[in-house]
Amino acid sequence: MPPLPAGTTPRPGVRLAEIHGLRGLALVLVVLFHLFGAGRVSGGVDVFLVVSGFLVTRSLVRRADDRSLRLGAVWARNAARLAPSALVVLAAVAAATWLLLPESHWESILRQVVASALYVENWDLIANELSYGAAGPAASPLQHFWSLSVQGQFLLVWPLVVLLVGVAVRRARLRVRTVLLPLVVLATAASFAYAVHLSAVQQPVAYFHTATRFWELGAGALLGLVPLGTPGRVRAVGAWLGLGLVVASGFVLDGGTLFPGPWTLWPVAGALLVIAGAGTPSSWGPRGTLAFRPLRFLADISYELYLWHWPVLIFLLALTGAHAVGWREAALVLTASVVLAWLTLRLVARPAARAVPRVLPAGRALVSLTAAVAATALVVVPVLGLQADLREQTAEAAEEFGVVDTQHPGASALGSAEVVPAADLRPALGAAQADKGQFFTDGRCVQEHGSGPGLDEALWCDLYAPEQPTATVLLAGGSHLYQWSETFLEIAREHDWRLVLAGKGQCRVKHVPEPEHGCVLWGDNVIELARELQPDAMVVDGTHTHYDGELETVPPEQVAAWQLLDRAGVRLIGLRDNPRGGHDPLVLDCLAEHGVGSGLCDLTRSEVYPEVSPALTTPGVPTSMVHVDLTRWYCRESDDRCPAVIGNVLVYRDGSHLTNTFLRSLQPMLTEALQAEAPWLFPAESASRP
């Protein structure tokens, strides 16, 4: 979470030099790790959470005790201090996206602009299965707004909670902190327990989840509610220890994969110790270090600098095509971000904050809130209009998804000597990510990725079920397998198969003796499903291709599952994996930059596939298993290339999956391969042969 702007802290006497300096130090760590951390997390965000929980709770409780807490006034002040700077950055990101980034990025980033402006970006990232990652040309320039969304939700709900407690205790003549303290203890403990649980089963979701982050805010709130009675010298020494924990956190822990679980106690404890030691008269404390003038300057602009530095970094990487920055580029990002932050603070944030007085009558609060809503609308409404235009264009393009014709033959063009006439690309680059087929996200038969209650269940459904099927075919595997669903469906309809689908995102059918991973547990359940259904054929992911030049493999866990299925009498068909086109969505970006006919976006076949499929050479693969290899229809051995566009059809819809249109163009080749390798699925054709 970005540090709260200076104006959101309590009255000046409470804003101690150590706390202000701690925010500046935490920001420095966040920026440096974003520049050079390669995805590691500094722990600075967690420090911001603790500091914000401490300061905001103290301010609210003081006002509730003296009965000056007015909900509208609090919301208006927070809106005046948070929204202006954030909206300026969001408007700049929307404009830069439209002007500088390929069309394949537009829809997702514009959606995130709206989500960020409404303080629900963390939920958008969860809904779209995006995880925290390192800076790169494919990263979202608004990824960091997830934490501002958590802050916005906290600042919306927490004042209401404190106000209700204040109203409840008024007649009992109790102080607000007396009743609020046990409530915060319970809520913090519940949030921490949930964070531990969700981090263990779905860490990417836990990382962004508001409920798993509240305990860090709650820890700060607890410190603000409990009087500190330890001697000043002890607290001062503890502050040095806390400072060491804060600085060391990112170097010792990989918070991107560990937080917000138990290891988050490291930076949280560090922040609590520094805050607890703030204001002590002892010269033993770190006040002089944290009051260092450059650190105070960074603390003053910390909110705006947090907002600006990440999009500046991402747009620079997108423009240069680099995956990381060197020292010169880092200096450029830092300088530009500091200048933009200072200008935003001076020209936008401070004037907006001065417009809202500390004592705010109800009428002025309503006016201020209305102004904040209007300012948000100035950003959100135009972006929604652009989104509507993009959706309309995608809807028009979707009418041609899966349509193969003489001008768009797709895969068949790779095996033909005839020149394909020039035609528009299908699907269009801007609509490619939507060309995934109707079953790709079908919740009836495609399980969500991740582990946890219900996520190990083998969901399945009939894609086609004639009254008297000639055969039953089960498709079971990850997204590289169930992306073929519509292609198999056409074959099933033609040959009267019962076609069953059981898929799970980012998983394959695997088996290990003592499963602990969600994919393996799901795989075991799929094996049981296959034993019950006893299909005539079970189609599985036959191999595993990789990124970055690593050659195709067959994981031993898949071989173990195949052996169990073979012993259960289930006939297996392994479908060879397609090449991966680079980390999502770089193939589309490359085509947007260099053009469809440049050839610069093609893959090198020998960097993906070995000379012989590992499905034929890996020990333990059942001899009864048959293998379908369609690689010659999307890769050429003659020039060692796997084209990004074949027969005027775009091969990839992202960095890993094939477009449904290209898959549909492979239907005749898939049918022919199945007839050759699995003739028992085609009894009518077999009977008619001499």
Image (cartoon, rainbow, N blue to C red):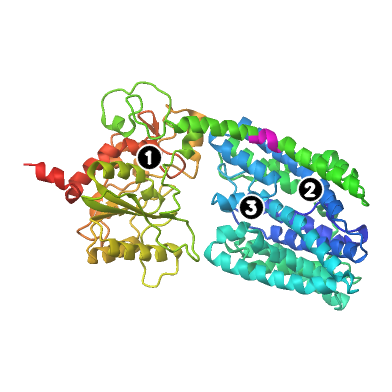
In this rendering, position of residue 67 left or right of residue 255: right
Q: Residue at x 90, y 46 (%)?
A: 363
Callout 1: few (<14), some (14-19), or many (20+) C-alpha neighbours within 10 Å? some
Location of the C terminus (image quadrant): top left
The amino acid sitting under disc 3 is Asn
Q: Amino acid at mark 1?
A: Thr
State the residue position of label 1: 604
- Please identify the dominant SS of the magenta region: helix
Measured from the top left, where is residue 615 in percent x and y? Answer: 27, 54
Could you tell me which secondary element the residue under label 3 belongs to?
helix
Residue positioned 93% across, 52% down in the render: 359
Q: Is residue 57 above or below residue 322?
A: below
Region in magenta: 380-384
At mark 2, the secondary structure is helix
Front-most of 59 and 472? 472
Q: Which residue is mark 2?
A: 82
Per the image, the residue denoted by label 3 is: 122
Q: Disc 2 versus disc 3: distance between alpha carbons? A: 17 Å
Place of residue 180 in the rendered image (x, y in percent of width and height, measured from the top left): 80, 70
Q: Which mark sits nearer the N-terminus, 2 or 1? A: 2
